[in-house]
Structure formats: structure tokens, C-alpha cells
Image (cartoon, rainbow, N blue to C red):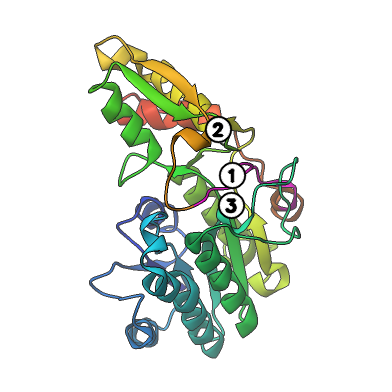
């Protein structure tokens, strides 16, 4: 059974990947204690000890606003570390799966972005994530780079958990309504990843072909899009039967009324046509994914 080295085991996506990848190989999951992504020697040490056939890098510096004041650390983790992993993967004839972001784009396009659109990040975080993509590509190692957006889940820090908390503390929430994207459940991203691996790297698949034959960047988000305000409204609507109190009033505001250190793209919509064309994968709507996530959080069985 192939060895899979998974980084970021305690993160939103990494935690889900530990389960979805389990049937596809012997998963060696590491966190910051085992591997310091700011230290290339730490990365090389773990990779050479594990000798994996596949590296799945779910670790990242994700503090978007803090990155503006810590650009060197953000670049070390997001920009340099993925390249080091890819260098080691190439040496082992292994493949790499890496996660990137809608923040590599500037958001000025009036349609969903496709993989070939020219990146133009507006913030440090976006620039470091783009550097990571480029570092992996430069090594020539077989790779799948999955760009996603607005990731949330039942763990960690994310918009979903913040809205649920604030809804119990405040009577009114002011939410930005002029940024548009696709809220992505961490479980969905993990399942898409595992299906891609199963198709193109698993000996259990009779028609499996090497990842090297499909190497590249793919957008992996649910179908549809909404604003942060629309996302919050749907969260409160789905949570209404469990909150036990009157939901707060939602007030739509422009980005200019909620200034943050890092500039966000106004349009974060990503086209998944390439994912469907290459892997035959169709993602569910963001609304359905959110409903399933909240059902699970409330202890309701998900069909």
C-alpha cells in the first residue's frame, strides 16, 4: 500500500483528509510539532524518513491580515515550503497535492476565473500562495494544485464558526455584501481530493493513470456563489432551529465600511469546468454543502 505524507493534520482540511485518504494508502499525518514549514531542513528530514509515494500539503500560513506584518514568515510557509516538498517528491518519483486560493486573483473579472487566467494577487497572503504554486511547478514534480475559496468547517477558525458565535452574542451583525465567492466545506475539498487520487494514483482503479499525466492547477469549489452577507444569511437560516433564540438582524455593508489590512478580491468565483472535464467530478451547491455541515454539527445524520 502506498505511503501518503499528509501535512497540516490539525487544520480544517488536513483533519478531513486523514479520514478520506485512509482507504487509499498508509497515511503519515504530521503537524507543526513534527514538521516546521518555515524550516526547509525540517521538511526534508520528514520526507526522507517517510519516503512517501504521495505528499498532500494541507498546511499553510492562513492568517490573511497578519501576513501583511509577517511577510517573510508567510512566504517561508506558503511560498518556499511547497517547493521544498516538490523537490523531495521529484527525488522520490512521488507526486504532490497542494492547496492554493482565490486570492491569487485581483477580482476585477466579471466572470468566474479559469485556471489559465493571469494571477494578480492584491495582498501578501495571495502573493505567497502564488509563489508556492510557481515553486511546485518549477520542480517538474507530478502535481495537483487545487485552488479553493472561503473554506469553513466544524473545526478551527472560519467564517461559519464566527457567525454562529456572534449570533449568540449580538442583536445585529454587519456583513460585507460586495465580495462574491463560493463557501467551501473542508469535507468537500477532502472528498474531491480523495476522488482525484483514487482515479489517478490508486492501484484499485483499473484505468488509473499517473498524476504526471494530469499535472496542473484545478479549481475546486462547490457550485454557485454568494456574498459574505448571503453566506451569513444562509448560516442563520439553517441554524434557526437549533439556536434557541431570535437570530440577529443582518445588515449588508460595503467593503469600504469594514477595512482590513489585507485587500480582498471582490470577485472570488472560480470555474470548475476543468475539474469536471479532466476528472468527471461535479461538486454540489454551496447551499447543500453548508446544510450538510450544519446537520453534522448538530448531530443530525447526513444522508
Between discs 1 and 2, the one toward the N terminus: 1
Compared across the picture, whether 68 is left or right of 133 comes to left
- Residue occupied by mark 3: 102
Closest to the observer, 171 or 8: 171
Classed neighbour count for the residue bearing mark 2: other residues with Cα under 10 Å, few (<14), some (14–19), many (≥20): many
- The residue under label 1 is 221
Give coordinates of residue 61: x percent, y percent: 39, 63
Q: Is residue 130 visible?
A: yes
Counting from the top left corner in percent of width and height, residue 251 is at 44, 19
Query: Quick one: label 1, few (<14), some, or many (20+) residues within 10 Å?
Result: many
Q: CA distance from mark 3 to mark 1?
A: 10 Å
Q: Which residue is labeled 2 in the image?
A: 286
Q: Residue at x 30, y 76 (%)?
A: 36
Q: Kindly identify the residue that appears in the image at 77 percent across and 51 percent down.
A: 277
Considering the numbered disc 3 on the image, is that residue within a helix, a strand or a loop? helix
Query: Looking at the picture, does residue 28 appear above or below residue 219?
Result: below
Amino acid at each position: 500500500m502506498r505511503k501518503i505524507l499528509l501535512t497540516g493534520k490539525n487544520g480544517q482540511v488536513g483533519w478531513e483528509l486523514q479520514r478520506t485518504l485512509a482507504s487509499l494508502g498508509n497515511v503519515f499525518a504530521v503537524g507543526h510539532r513534527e514538521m516546521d514549514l518555515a524550516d526547509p531542513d525540517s521538511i526534508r528530514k520528514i520526507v526522507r524518513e517517510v519516503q512517501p509515494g504521495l505528499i498532500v500539503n494541507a498546511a499553510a500560513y492562513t492568517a490573511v491580515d497578519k501576513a501583511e506584518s509577517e511577510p517573510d514568515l508567510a512566504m517561508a510557509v506558503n511560498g518556499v515550503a511547497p517547493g521544498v516538498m516538490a523537490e523531495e517528491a521529484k527525488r522520490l518519483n512521488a507526486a504532490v497535492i497542494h492547496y492554493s486560493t482565490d486570492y491569487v486573483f485581483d477580482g476585477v473579472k466579471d466572470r468566474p476565473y479559469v485556471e489559465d487566467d493571469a494571477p494578480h494577487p492584491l495582498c501578501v497572503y495571495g502573493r505567497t500562495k502564488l509563489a508556492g504554486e510557481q515553486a511546485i511547478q518549477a520542480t517538474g514534480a507530478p502535481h495537483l494544485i487545487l485552488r479553493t475559496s472561503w473554506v469553513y468547517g466544524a473545526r478551527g477558525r472560519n467564517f461559519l464558526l464566527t457567525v454562529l458565535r456572534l449570533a449568540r452574542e449580538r442583536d445585529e451583525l454587519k456583513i460585507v455584501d460586495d465580495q462574491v465567492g463560493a463557501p467551501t466545506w473542508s469535507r468537500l475539498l477532502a472528498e474531491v481530493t480523495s476522488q482525484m487520487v483514487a482515479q489517478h494514483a490508486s492501484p484499485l482503479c483499473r484505468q488509473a493513470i499517473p498524476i504526471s499525466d494530469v499535472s496542473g492547477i484545478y479549481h475546486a469549489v462547490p457550485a454557485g456563489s454568494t456574498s459574505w452577507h448571503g453566506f451569513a444569511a444562509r448560516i442563520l437560516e439553517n441554524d434557526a432551529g437549533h439556536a434557541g433564540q431570535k437570530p440577529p438582524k443582518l445588515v449588508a455593508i460595503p467593503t469600504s465600511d469594514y477595512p482590513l489590512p489585507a485587500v480582498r478580491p471582490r470577485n472570488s468565483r472560480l470555474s470548475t469546468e476543468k475539474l469536471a472535464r479532466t476528472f468527471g467530478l461535479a461538486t454540489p451547491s454551496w447551499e447543500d454543502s453548508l446544510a450538510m455541515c450544519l446537520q453534522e454539527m448538530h448531530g443530525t445524520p447526513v444522508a
